[in-house]
Image (tube, coloured by chain):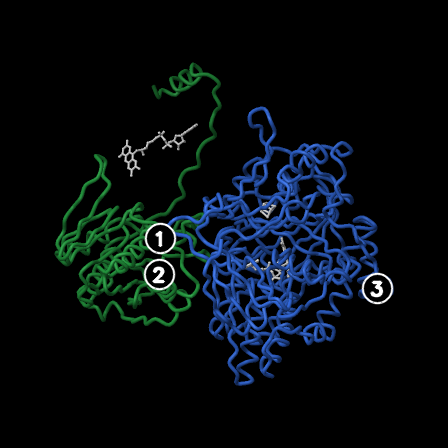
Chain colours: A blue, B green
Amino acid sequence: MSVERDVMEYDVLVVGAGPAGLSAACRIKQKAAEAGKEISVCLVEKGSEVGAHILSGAVFEPRSLNELFPNWKELGAPLSTPVKRDEVWFFTSPEKGIKTPGPFVPHTMHNEGNYIISLGNLCRWLAQQAESLGVEIYPGFAAQEVLIDEKNVVRGVQVGDMGIGHDGKPKEGVYTPGIELRAKYTLFSEGCRGHLGKRLLKHYKLDEQSDVQHYGIGLKELWTIDPAKHEPGLVIHGAGWPLNSANPGGFFLYHLENNQVYVGLIVDLSYSNPYLSPFDEFQRLKHHPVLRKYLEGGKRVSYGARAICKGGFNSLPKMVFPGGALLGCDLGTLNFSKIKGSHTAMKSGMLAADAAAAALIAGSEGGDELAAYPESFKASWLYDELYRDRNFGAAMHKFGVLFGAAFNYIDQNWFRGKSPITLHDNTPDYSTFKPAAQSQKIEYPKPDGVISFDKLSSVFLSSTNHEEDQPVHLKLTDPTIPISKNLPMYDEPAQRYCPAGVYEVIEAGGAKKFQINAQNCVHCKTCDIKDPAQNITWVAPEGSGGPNYANM
Amino acid sequence: MKALVSVKRVVDYNVRIQVKPDGSGVVTDGVKFSVNPFDEIAMEEAVRLREKGKVTEIVAVTIGGAKCEETLRTALAFGADRAVHVKEEGEVQPLTAAQALAAVFKKEGAQLFLLGKQAIDDDANQTGQMVAALLDLPQATFASKIELDGAKALVTREVDAGLETLEVDLPAVVTTDLRLNEPRYLKLPDIMKAKKKPIEVVSLGDLGVTAAAGLKATKTAAPPKRSKGVMVKTVDELVTALKGKGLI
Ligand SMILES: Cc1cc2nc3c(=O)[nH]c(=O)nc-3n(C[C@H](O)[C@H](O)[C@H](O)COP(=O)(O)OP(=O)(O)OC[C@H]3O[C@@H](n4cnc5c(N)ncnc54)[C@H](O)[C@@H]3O)c2cc1C
Ligand SMILES: Cc1cc2nc3c(=O)[nH]c(=O)nc-3n(C[C@H](O)[C@H](O)[C@H](O)COP(=O)(O)OP(=O)(O)OC[C@H]3O[C@@H](n4cnc5c(N)ncnc54)[C@H](O)[C@@H]3O)c2cc1C
Ligand code: SF4
């Protein structure tokens, strides 16, 4: 099918309005204004509005924001709850836990000076700043393809088509071909496991020199709680029950403003038991007395999930290719020892922006590699911070949670991350499943509808919506694998790792069938990461489809 | 012929509405807003009428605070030629809205006023009717088909008995139903162009309207929770269960 596509040209195109992309866009405009030059910047976001697809913790370290907008307070940035107190727990059983005494809390888990925020709302605010600086932001448009020319240079992206039916045919009267957005430099900031970022890594072999990337899936809920139990600024982190060293992870509970708390669990996607369900682990976790005491008498307001990339320093691929760069979690800048990726995403965006702006101000026609970006990265605090943290995740994988934690305690507190050892972990997360036959089935308790809930009522609270009549955006390379291989080997784990109930194995006419309920997808990207056959590819659905997170 | 289309900013239809704990209204902080879907249908219809050469100019109007500019930009991206923003940060009650819209309609000298049959936030379903009354104009509500024929409009409505077609003299007020059309996808270049189209800002005072406060919302509550269902295996069991509840 050949279609006429409109073309729009810019100096810089940014893909994805998370902290990385928005910071990059703002910074370019600031640099252009300083130099008295006009640099046009366009930003596309697949969510129905900026923030609709942002799901984070979030305890926010304001370091990058201080650099980008030193006057953020006057500008009304939504940072209103400073962290007052940290608690770190290790749960030894469903009823018991040990609180780590203050002096033994790892250095990276101290949060004085940080804020408890909704990252989605910070992004909404950053988008306002960007627009007032002259950035053109287009929410509701997903970048679907990378435009690579015959010289192997990235020239921009093609926006997804609208109005294609589930059969792949254009729908009469509403079909709207996606336009081509071309730019001198294209900055990809799609967040963890960006679907275009993934292709760029492969096409330009950007990750040839680095360790494989590692991931976690983060599930989170927003609750309104009893005002008597609310302690604004309290940050609780912990590990242990219901997870274990073969299936590790950690939880959080943050008290923000307005009698609200965020509660969440991050499950390491290197988990090995195919019967494990991150969603159900999260639901039962909330019954632990340390967390339940806050939630009891409260009301759940929202739910969502999103993958995080946690490989850190050792997994960082090459950052640039001809005509563009990777930023933020699309690159993998999260600092896992702090579970913080927003300030690092912002900083990487700012560094890439500096490089692009300098090139354009010097008269560049684009299309080249922005070598100044990796260079300034090496000289920045971001490099330093990620370097110190480089052993954290690998230590957890190698030594298990307890010994890993001890290693990390020594590494972080005695050596401040500068110990002479570097640990590597090159087993990809999709290959860690044990066969179902060798694994223990997990009987999860039934949700009580008060503290714990089922998947469907949870997805409902994410306000997820997709146009129903469109092609399924979760592509199976070989449609037979789920039933022929994954089911006998691993009891098709997609039924459990997907936090939105998208994948089901159903009986149809006496045969098993793999069903994909694509409308439920919250765009967390876990299936693309964890499918043992690497047979599922997430592509962008029609623009504005997906969750509509508020205050997440 | 000039057409006026009103567009209201409402909480997006995908958003799960949460009632504020004190019952004073629904939560709107951090929530996505968009154009009332019925107004999008009205906007789409106006554009189609222009494409057919029946309408020559489309003016979009909204009443509300600064954030409503976004709503007008969406209407402009659909294809409105220009927009009027009646700026009012406070609460706007149905009668005030109708008075303001009537004043804009008169000022613009428009022939056709297209608007949604209801807004999905308050479901009041009365603005179009009140505007028609205030201007003493014919009205055709819940349109599922609109044809313009010289100085008349033929409007088809879905009623219980089937389809009813009304003929009204122009100028007239027409409210749109769900099945009138399927609004188009906005194109990125059109959204860009919309950023440059003119928006005239006026106040209620400019239009000679004073905000009325005839209504007072006393309480907002979430619908009662559905109680748990019971699975029955046979029709007999069902009948017994219904009898047990005194329902049959
Ligand atoms: C449960 C959880 C808890 C966390 N807690 C914290 C914390 O406490 N502190 C902290 O600092 N960090 C935390 N993080 C990490 C932090 O959220 C991320 O590191 C950060 O959001 C990364 O920013 P980003 O801009 O790279 O990507 P993202 O924030 O993921 O943003 C990417 C944006 O791009 C859009 N997009 C993607 N693909 C396309 C496309 N093809 N076309 C158009 N748009 C596209 C997405 O919709 C999204 O809006 C947490 C993460 C999770 C999941
Ligand atoms: C614009 C409009 C106006 C109308 N006005 C009126 C009116 O004024 N008066 C009037 O009497 N009717 C009116 N109707 C008709 C009426 O709303 C519905 O058409 C009618 O209720 C259809 O009922 P149903 O059970 O056949 O189907 P549905 O409406 O599809 O089902 C109703 C409910 O039955 C249950 N149900 C359906 N299928 C199953 C199943 N397989 N298993 C278990 N539960 C099931 C569900 O809970 C569902 O919500 C109107 C319809 C329209 C479109
Ligand atoms: S289908 Fe994949 S991306 Fe979508 S919610 Fe499920 S696991 Fe996440």
The quadrant of the picture showing ligand 2 is: top left
Question: Residue A133 at what x, y percent from top left?
Answer: 49, 75
- The front one of B81 and B25 is B81
Disc 1 within 8 angstroms of ligand 2 (CB): no
Question: Is the same chain shared between marks 2 and 1?
Answer: yes
Chain ID at mark 3:
A
Q: Residue furthest top?
A: B236
Q: Which mark is residue B183?
A: 1
Kindly report the distance in space between the C-alpha atoms of the residues bearing marks 1 and 3: 63 Å
Cβ–Cβ below 8 Å for labels 2 and 1?
A: yes
Task: Say how many tags the image has.
Answer: 3
Q: Which residue is mark 3?
A: A414
* Kind of residue sitting beneath label 1: Pro
- The front one of A14 and B220 is A14
Please say whether residue A129 is visible from this viewpoint.
Answer: no
Circle 3 packing at 10 Å, graded few (<14), some (14-19), many (20+), is few
Chain ID at mark 2:
B
Image quarter in which the N terminus of chain B is found? bottom left
Question: Residue A470 at what x, y percent from top left?
Answer: 48, 46
Residue at left 56%, top 49%?
A304
Question: Residue A495 at what x, y percent from top left?
Answer: 62, 38
Compared with A467, A314 (above or below) is below
Q: Which residue is mark 2?
A: B78
Under tag 1, what secondary structure? Answer: loop
